[in-house]
C-alpha cells in the first residue's frame, strides 16, 4: 500500500483528518480518492497571487511566464511547494521569473513536450489538481507546447525499436464465463453492484457488478491480468487507490488477487506453434507514439479529447483558462481509444465556465466548431444536438446538430433569430451525414457566414443569410454535448473529439486536421532481422484502438534502420496478425499477400520504409490495450517457410427444414419510383416528384421480402403515388395525352355519368394494369372499386357544393388509388 505522508507542521488535528479519510473511503464509485506522493502543502508561506519580481529578460522567458508559469504557480498546483526556500526544483518560484525559467528548462523535453518530466510527474499522480492524472498530464503538455510554440504540423516522429522479445506463453480468457462465475463474479456482484451495473441508480462503468454474467465478464476482462493478478486494475483500484474497500483495503485486494489467481490457474498457457515463422512480440505501449502531427490549433480555446476513460467528467485540455470541464449524465459510456458513447445522455458545462466561449469568440467575431462524431443512425431528428451553446430549446448562441442524413448549423447573430435560425443544412440529396466516424467542421465568419465541412471537404452548401457581428450572444448560456440543456433532442452516437477555435479554420487547415485523424496511434515495429538476415529489420504497422472492442492495423511497410542494409528481393507471402500467442481468426486481410520486396520502390511514409499494402483491418481486443501482445506470422519470409497443418474438413450440417418462402415480393424504393414514372408518364426528375421521392426514400421499402413490408411503407407509397398523379393532372399536355376524352372543366355538381367515368377509368386501366395479364387483378373488379370511389368524391348538393377543382381532384384520387396499390408494388 502506498503510504500517505502527513506533514508534522500541519496545524489541523489528526483526528478530524482520519475521520475525513474514513468518510471519503466509504463513498461509492463516483468519487476518486487521490493519493498524493507529495505531502499536503502547509497553510503558510504560500506564493503571492500576482508576480512582483524582476521582468522577463527575453521574449522566451515571457512566453514561459504567460503559457506555463501563470498556470502552474498557483497554490492549488506546483506553486504550493516548488517555490524558493521550500521544495526543489523551484520552477514555480515567485521571486524571479528568470530563475524559474532556467529551472523549468531542465524539466522539459523541447522536441516532445508530452515526454517532459513536468508532464510525466503529474500524469503519474504527483500532486494532480484534477480527478484524472491523465487530464493533468495533458494540460501540462499543452501549456509547455504553447510556450515552445511547438506547432503540431512541424512535429517529426522517429521510430524507436522496442526491446527484442520472442512470443511468450500467454493465458487467454476463455469464451466460456464459467471460471469467472465460480471465482470472481460473486465478489464483484456483492461489493461493486451498487454502482458498477448498467441499471444502478447512478450507473458507473465498467459494469463489472452486473447481474448478467456475460455483461459482467466482458466488462471485467480488460481489468484483469491473468499472468500477473496483482497488476489487475480492479486490484490496484482497491489496494492502492482505496476505492470502495469493504473491510481493509490491503486485505480486500488480496482477496481479489486470490480469486483471479485461482481462475488463472485453471486456464492453460497458449503456446505459439513452433512450426510458424513469427516476428518478435510487441505490445501497444511499446510502440512509437504517432501523435497527431499536422493539426492546426493556434486559435484553439476549448478542446475535449475524452481520454480519461472513466468517471463522469470530460476535461477541457485546451490549456486556455477557465477550463470548460463537462459533467456526464444520463446514459453514457466511455469508448476505448478515446471517446464517449451517448444514448439519452449528455455532457454539460457550467454557465460560468461556458462564458469563456462568449468572451473569446465575440472578441474576434468568428469561430470554428470541430468534431469527430459517429452518429448511431441516420433517423435522428429534432435536430438532435451534437454540440450546443444554449439557454433552452429555442435560445442559443450556436449549435451543430443532426437531422436524418443532414448536418445542421445554427448561429445567433443580427441576421438570425434568438435560436440561430434559419439554419444552414447540408443538402438532402448529398447525404453528407452517415452512421460512421466523420470529421465535421462548422466555420462562421462575420463577413462570410456559415460553411460546413465533412471529412476535410466543403459540402458546397451556401449560407443564404449574410454574416454579422455576434453582439446578440448571451453569456449566461451553457455549453453542452449530446442533447439540449433541457435534456431534450438527444443525440445518439459516439463523440471522439470536440474543439472550439475563435478563428475560422482555412480549407487547408481543415484538411490537415482531418488527415491527422483521431485517437492515440502507435507505430508497432515487429522485428524480423533473424528471419531475413538483415540487421535492424522491422515490419511496421500503424495501430490504434479503433473502439472499445477492436484495434485498427493499417498501411504496413518494411524497413531496416541500418542505412547500409538492403531488403531488395526478399519474398513475403501470407502475413497474418497474431495476438497473445495465437493467430487471430478474423481480420486477416494480409493473409493473401504474395510479393517480392522491391528495394527501389518509392516510399510512401516519412521513414523511408518500403510499402507493403495500403489496406487496413480490424483485430478484436482480448485482454485490453495494456496487456494484449501482438506478433506477425508468415507463410514465407525470406528463405523461411511455415509448416501449416491442414484444417480438418468440417462435417456438413444436417439439412434444416425451413418455412416455405413467399413466391411474391415487393418492389423496393427505386423500383417503385421507376414503375410509377413509367405508368404515369411523369418524369422521375420532375421537380416536385423528385423532392417528394428524396423525402420519402427512407420510408419506402428497402428490401423485396414481403414479410418485411410495414404500414409505414404503404403510407410512403401512397404519398408518392399522389404526387405523381398530381403532376400528371396539373401538366396540361401530359393529361391531354393520358386522358384524351376527359373534359377537366366538367362541373362536378352535376355528378359523373357513365361516359365521364369511362373517360377517367379506362385510360388508367389500360396504362397501369394492362390487358390479359393473369397476375393482375381483374379489370371489372378494379373498375367497380373506382366507380364507387368517384361516386363518394362527387356527392355534391346545394348544401355541399363542389369546388371548381373537384373534377381534377377526382381524377387524381382515381389515379393514385391504382398507382399506389399492390397492383403496382407487388412483384
Image (tube, rainbow, N blue to C red):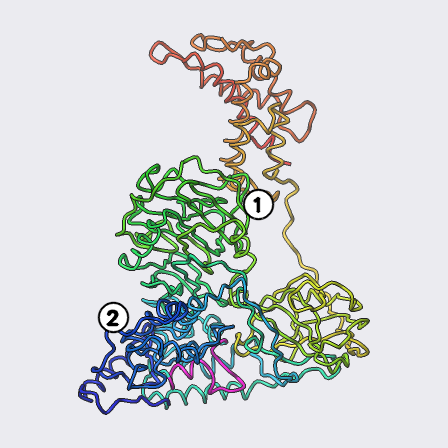
Give x and y (percent) for residue 793.
45, 18
Residue 810 part of the magenta segment: no
Judge whether 276 appears above or below 345 on screen: below
Location of mark 2 (residue): 50
Give x and y (percent) for residue 799.
33, 12
Near-viewer residue (254 or 74): 74
- The image quadrant that residue 162 belongs to is bottom right
Q: Is residue 178 visible?
A: yes
Judge whether 196 appears above or below 410 on screen: below
How packed mark 1 is, by other alpha carbons closer than 10 Å (few <14, some 14-19, many 20 or more), is few
Question: Residue at the location (39% across, 43% down)?
Answer: 446
The number of discs equals 2
273 vs 196, left or right, is right
Decide which of tag 1 and tag 2 comes sooner along the chain: 2
Judge whether 366 appears above or below 691 on screen: below
Location of mark 1 (residue): 707
Helix, strand or loop at label 2? It is: loop
Q: Is residue 785 visible?
A: no
- The image quadrant that residue 158 belongs to is bottom right
- The image quadrant that residue 663 belongs to is top right
Give x and y (percent) for residue 324.
34, 61
Residue 237 part of the magenta segment: yes
Near-viewer residue (655 or 33): 33
Q: Which residues are magenta?
A: 222-240
Q: CA distance from mark 1 to mark 2?
A: 74 Å
Which tag is nearer the camera, tag 1 or tag 2?
2
Amino acid at each position: 500500500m502506498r503510504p500517505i505522508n502527513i506533514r508534522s507542521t500541519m496545524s489541523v488535528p489528526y483526528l478530524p483528518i482520519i475521520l475525513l479519510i474514513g468518510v471519503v473511503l466509504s463513498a461509492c464509485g463516483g468519487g476518486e480518492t487521490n493519493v498524493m506522493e507529495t505531502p499536503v502543502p502547509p497553510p503558510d508561506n504560500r506564493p503571492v497571487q500576482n508576480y512582483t519580481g524582476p521582468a522577463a529578460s527575453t521574449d522566451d522567458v515571457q512566453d514561459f511566464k504567460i503559457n506555463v508559469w501563470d498556470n502552474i504557480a498557483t497554490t492549488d498546483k506546483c506553486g504550493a511547494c516548488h517555490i524558493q526556500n521550500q521544495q526543489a526544483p523551484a520552477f514555480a518560484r515567485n521571486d524571479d521569473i528568470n530563475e524559474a525559467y532556467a529551472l523549468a528548462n531542465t524539466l522539459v523535453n523541447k522536441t516532445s513536450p508530452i515526454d517532459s518530466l513536468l508532464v510525466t510527474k503529474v500524469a503519474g499522480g504527483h500532486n494532480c489538481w484534477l480527478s484524472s492524472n491523465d487530464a493533468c498530464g495533458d494540460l501540462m503538455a499543452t501549456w509547455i507546447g504553447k510556450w515552445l510554440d511547438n506547432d503540431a504540423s512541424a512535429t517529426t516522429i522517429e521510430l524507436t525499436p522496442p526491446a527484442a522479445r520472442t512470443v511468450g506463453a500467454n493465458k487467454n480468457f476463455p469464451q466460456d464465463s464459467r471460471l469467472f462465475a465460480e471465482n470472481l463474479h460473486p465478489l464483484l456482484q456483492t461489493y461493486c453492484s451498487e454502482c458498477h451495473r448498467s441499471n444502478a441508480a447512478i450507473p458507473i462503468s465498467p459494469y463489472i457488478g452486473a447481474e448478467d454474467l456475460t455483461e459482467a465478464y466482458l466488462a471485467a476482462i480488460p481489468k484483469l491480468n491473468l499472468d500477473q493478478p496483482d497488476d489487475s486494475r480492479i486490484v490496484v483500484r482497491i489496494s492502492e487507490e482505496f476505492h470502495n474497500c469493504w473491510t481493509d483495503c490491503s486485505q480486500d485486494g488480496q482477496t481479489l488477487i486470490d480469486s483471479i489467481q485461482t481462475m488463472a490457474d485453471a486456464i492453460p498457457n497458449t503456446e505459439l506453434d513452433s512450426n510458424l515463422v513469427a516476428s518478435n512480440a510487441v505490445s501497444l505501449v511499446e510502440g512509437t507514439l504517432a501523435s497527431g502531427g499536422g493539426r492546426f490549433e493556434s486559435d484553439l480555446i476549448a478542446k475535449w479529447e475524452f481520454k480519461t476513460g472513466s468517471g463522469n467528467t470530460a476535461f477541457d485540455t485546451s490549456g486556455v483558462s477557465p477550463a470548460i470541464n463537462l459533467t456526464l449524465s444520463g446514459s453514457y459510456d466511455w469508448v476505448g481509444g478515446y471517446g464517449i458513447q451517448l444514448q439519452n445522455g449528455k455532457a454539460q458545462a457550467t454557465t460560468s465556465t461556458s462564458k469563456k466561449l462568449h468572451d473569446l469568440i465575440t472578441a474576434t467575431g468568428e469561430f470554428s466548431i470541430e468534431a469527430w462524431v459517429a452518429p448511431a443512425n441516420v433517423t435522428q431528428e429534432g435536430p438532435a444536438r451534437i454540440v450546443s451553446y444554449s439557454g433552452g430549446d429555442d435560445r442559443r448562441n450556436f449549435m451543430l446538430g443532426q437531422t436524418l442524413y443532414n448536418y445542421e448549423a445554427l448561429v445567433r447573430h443580427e441576421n438570425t433569430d434568438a435560436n440561430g435560425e434559419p439554419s444552414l443544412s447540408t443538402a438532402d440529396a448529398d447525404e453528407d451525414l452517415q452512421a460512421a466516424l466523420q470529421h465535421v467542421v462548422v466555420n462562421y465568419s462575420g463577413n462570410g457566414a456559415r460553411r460546413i465541412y465533412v471529412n476535410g471537404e466543403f459540402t458546397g452548401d451556401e449560407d443564404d443569410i449574410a454574416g454579422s457581428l455576434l453582439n446578440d450572444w448571451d453569456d449566461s448560456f451553457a455549453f453542452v454535448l449530446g442533447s439540449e440543456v433541457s435534456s431534450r433532442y438527444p443525440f445518439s452516437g459516439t463523440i471522439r473529439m470536440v474543439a472550439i477555435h475563435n478563428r475560422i479554420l482555412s480549407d487547408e487547415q481543415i484538411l490537415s486536421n482531418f488527415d491527422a485523424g483521431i485517437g492515440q496511434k502507435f507505430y508497432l515495429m515487429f522485428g524480423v532481422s533473424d528471419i531475413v538476415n538483415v540487421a535492424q529489420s522491422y515490419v511496421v504497422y500503424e495501430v490504434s484502438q479503433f473502439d472499445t472492442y477492436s484495434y485498427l492495423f493499417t498501411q504496413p511497410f518494411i524497413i531496416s534502420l541500418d542505412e547500409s542494409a538492403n531488403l531488395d528481393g526478399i519474398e513475403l507471402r501470407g502475413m497474418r496478425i497474431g495476438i497473445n500467442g495465437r493467430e487471430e481468426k478474423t481480420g486477416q486481410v494480409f493473409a493473401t499477400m504474395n510479393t517480392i520486396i522491391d528495394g527501389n520502390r518509392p516510399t510512401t511514409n516519412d521513414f523511408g520504409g518500403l510499402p507493403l499494402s495500403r489496406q487496413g483491418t480490424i483485430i478484436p481486443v482480448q485482454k485490453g490495450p495494456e496487456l494484449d501482445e501482438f506478433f506477425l506470422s508468415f507463410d514465407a519470409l525470406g528463405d523461411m517457410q511455415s509448416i501449416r497443418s491442414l484444417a480438418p474438413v468440417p462435417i456438413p450440417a444436417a439439412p434444416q427444414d425451413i418455412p416455405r418462402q413467399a413466391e411474391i415480393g415487393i418492389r423496393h424504393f427505386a423500383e417503385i419510383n421507376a414503375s410509377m414514372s413509367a405508368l404515369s408518364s411523369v418524369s422521375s426528375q420532375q421537380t416536385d416528384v423528385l423532392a417528394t421521392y428524396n423525402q420519402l426514400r427512407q420510408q419506402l421499402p428497402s428490401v423485396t421480402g414481403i414479410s418485411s413490408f410495414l404500414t409505414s411503407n404503404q403510407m410512403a407509397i401512397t404519398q408518392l403515388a399522389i404526387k405523381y398523379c398530381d403532376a400528371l393532372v396539373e401538366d396540361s399536355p401530359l393529361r391531354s395525352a393520358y386522358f384524351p376524352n376527359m373534359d377537366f372543366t366538367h362541373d362536378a355538381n352535376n355528378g359523373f355519368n357513365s361516359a365521364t367515368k369511362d373517360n377517367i377509368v379506362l385510360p388508367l386501366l389500360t396504362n397501369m394494369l394492362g390487358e390479359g395479364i393473369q397476375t393482375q387483378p381483374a379489370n371489372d373488379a378494379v373498375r367497380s372499386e373506382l366507380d364507387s370511389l368517384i361516386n363518394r368524391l362527387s356527392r355534391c348538393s346545394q348544401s355541399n357544393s363542389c369546388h371548381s377543382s373537384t373534377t381534377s381532384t377526382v381524377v387524381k384520387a382515381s389515379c393514385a388509388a391504382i398507382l399506389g396499390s399492390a397492383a403496382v408494388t407487388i412483384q
